[in-house]
Image (cartoon, rainbow, N blue to C red):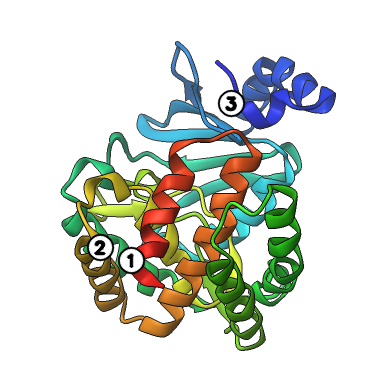
Amino acid sequence: MKITAAEQSQSGRDWLASLPERTQAMSQKWGIQVELGEAEAGFNAIVRQATRNGEPCVLKLDWPIDHAVREARALEVWNGIGAVKLLESDPGNGALLLESLDASRSLKSIPVAEAAKVAGGLIKRLAVQSPSGFRSLRDLAAELEVSLPLRQSQLSNPIPPEWLSWASDRVRKLGTGAGDRLVHGDLHYDNVLAGTREPWLAIDPKPIIGDPEYAVPELMWTRADELSDESDIQDLLSIIVTAGDLRDDLARGWTVVRCVDYWLWGLENGLTEDPKRCERILQALT
């Protein structure tokens, strides 16, 4: 069992070594019985299936620990509407107790057009008035306006200059006009699981305050390989925008900006396929 983020620092490796003790402490605190076997690991967390009073639940331990603070606050705001329900939280230990969903069935398991319609609807439902304390798209946009051209130069200009210029100009305008909705900042198809209380529920938010259209791009690039041509890419964007009652200009703008950002991030981290996916989407939308 490995968690990439935790393995990158000594404090993270210490946290990994402490997982048995942390799991035991949370089990006692919340009166849960953790199932035997290997934990499920993601980039920023481990997940253990459990029961409490005979009912299934999930113990999630986040790294870095402060991820749990933001995640718990967002899940409290949504209160199970469109998202996994938070049963208990101990952000100081990076621990969350969540309702049990079907981890074997995500939106990635159904046809992309159908999945995009569901995800678009979730974007709309999750875009509620946000309390203070979350990162804002205004701040993120200001950072991207500065970093995109610098990273492009450091990587020897892999992105066509007109696309980089368009993204840099657009992110400035998007940041200035960013809204005040609570947005699930990591809404891709694997982060929507089948449930019993509702057919599909979002998990693992990286909450941010701004425009719901910010959530669109990951739904574009994570299944881009299933889109045969530019028309399919345009159609997918239209499905998400229509299902979420979103603004087309903002959805396109954030998709271009985030594809440029993710293209550069992919190259910085040695990825090969994701930059190609971003290039295809940009070719279709610019």
N-terminal label among 3 and 1: 3
Q: Nearer the viewer, residue 8 or 83?
A: 8
Q: Amino acid at mark 2?
A: Glu
Residue at image coords 45%, 67%: 255
Amino acid beneath label 3 = Ser
Q: Are marks 3 and 1 in contact (CB under 8 Å)?
A: no
Q: Which residue is mark 3?
A: 27
Name which residue type carries label 1: Ala
Location of the C terminus by quadrant is bottom left
Q: Quadrant of residue 25?
A: top right
Between residue 50 and residue 246, name the one nearer to us: 246
Note whether 278 is above or below 248 in the view shown: above
- The residue that disc 1 covers is 284
Q: Nearer the viewer, residue 179 or 239?
A: 239
Q: Position of residue 186 (x, y in %)?
A: 50, 54
Residue sitting at 76 percent across and 43 percent down?
92
User: Which residue is denoted by mark 2 in the rendering?
Assistant: 230
Mark 3 or 1: in front is 1
N-terminal of the pair, mark 1 or mark 2, is 2
- Between tags 2 and 3, which lies in front? 2
Say what secondary structure mark 2 lies in: helix
